[in-house]
Amino acid sequence: MAAIKKYDAIILGGGAAGLMCAIEAGKRGRRVALIEHADRIGKKILISGGGRCNFTNIHCRPENFMSANPHFAKSALARYTPTDFLGLVKEHGIAYHEKTLGQLFCDASSQQIVAMLEDECLAAGVSIFVGTTVKEVRHENGFILNAGDIEFHAPKLVIATGGLSIPKMGATSFGYDLARQFGISIRDCRPALVPLTFNTADHRRYSELSGVSTEVIASIGSTRFREKMLFTHRGLSGPAILQISSYWNQNTQITLDLAPDRDLTLVMREQSANRNLASAKAALHRALPTRFAERWLELHSPPDWTNHSLTELERKVHNWMIEPAGTEGYDKAEVTAGGVETDELSAKTMESKKVPGLYFIGEVVDVTGHLGGFNFQWAWASGFSAGQAL
C-alpha cells in the first residue's frame, strides 16, 4: 500500500519555474513538495548558456515575449524583475558578467544557479523528490497524485513541467496532457528558438558554407532581429535565425539583410572604371565572409555592370528571401512556443479559472521569450507569482 504524504502545495517539475515557486511558497510557511521525474533538479538550467546559464536579461520588457495574449505576462514580469533575481545571485556571492544585449551569465558555471536554488529550497523547508514519476492525478477534495509507492495529497497543485523541447533531457507532454484532463485549452505547440533547414534548392546552393557566420538583419513582416547568422550542413542557425524562428510558420519567407547599414556597390556606381566582377568581389568581401561573398556572386552576378544591374545587386544583398523547408525540431529547440491558453489563467497568480487550486507556470504556458535570458526571467516571474499566491 502506498505511503500517504500530505502537503499544503505540490509542485510538479524541478526546473527554473518550479524551484522559484517552491522557494516563495516555502518562505511563506507553506508545506511544499517539489516532485521531479528526472534524477536531479535543474537539468536544463545546467546546460543553458553553454554551461554558464544566461539567467536573465537586464533589458527585459513585455515586448520580448510572444503569446496569443501579449498583455498576459505583464503582471508577473512587473512583480518579479531581473533586478530581483540579480539580488538573489549577489546574495549568494555568484560572480556574473554581461555578455551582449543585456544578457547576464555566470562567470563560472550554471551549477552555481542550481545550487543557489537548492539552498533556498532547503532554507524554506521544501521537500524535494527526484526520480519520482507521477502516474495519475485525481481531483477529490484537493489533489491526489499517485507516484507508485507514495501518494501525495494537497489542496494546491502547480504544473511546472516545461515544454517539449530537448526530449533527451526528459521533456514530455505531461503538463499539456494534465491540462487537457482538466478541460483546459492548449494553444498549438511548436519548436521555437530553433535552427531552420534549407529547402532542396537552397541546400544545393549553400550547404557547403557550413561554419560560415555573418551579421544580418532577419525579418518577417515588421519583426526584425540584428544578430549573427550561421550556416550549417542542414540550413541556418545563429542568434538571428533562432530569434526569427519563433515567428516563422510553414510556407513563410524570411528576409535577410546581409549587409546592414552598408551600400556595397556605391563606389562601383560612382566610378565606371570599377564596374567588373573583381570590384564586386572586393566590395562584398568587405562585408561578407570570403566563401559566402564568392558563392553569392556565383549565383547573383548581373549580366552586365550598368547602374540598373548594380542597383539590383545591391537590393538582393539587402533582401535575400529564403523559404525554409522546416526546423530542426524539438531536439534542437531551446523552448516550446504555444501551450496552456493564457485566457484560462489568472495573470496575477497563474491559477486556473476553471479549476481552483490548479496553477500553470513557466514554459508549459503560452508565453515564449526571445533568446537571451528572457525565458528564464519568465520562469522566475511566473514561479514567484504562483508561489506568492499559494
Image: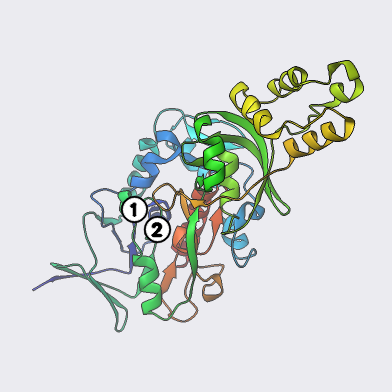
The x, y position of residue 96, in whole percent, is: 49, 31
Placement of 189 over or under 228, stated as above or below: below
- Nearest the viewer among 96 and 232 is 232
The x, y position of residue 132, in whole percent, is: 21, 59
Q: Kindly give the residue lying farthest to the bottom in the view shown.
A: 140
Instruction: Look at the image and tell me whether residue 372 can be seen.
Output: no
Query: Mark 2 belongs to which amino acid?
Result: Leu
- Nearest the viewer among 254 and 296 is 296
Placement of 73 over or under 182, stated as above or below: above
Residue located at (49% from left, 51% from top)? 327
Say which quarter of the image contains residue 276.
top right
Left or right: residue 113 versus residue 303 is left
Placement of 223 over or under 103, stated as above or below: below
Residue located at (56% from left, 39% from top)? 239
The residue to which callout 2 is attached is: 164
Left or right: residue 20 versus residue 303 is left
The residue to which callout 1 is attached is: 167
Query: Mark 1 belongs to which amino acid?
Result: Pro
**Quadrant in which the N terminus is drawn:** bottom left
Q: Kindly state the secondary structure of the residue where label 1 is placed.
A: helix
Mark 2 vs mark 1, CA separation in Å? 6 Å
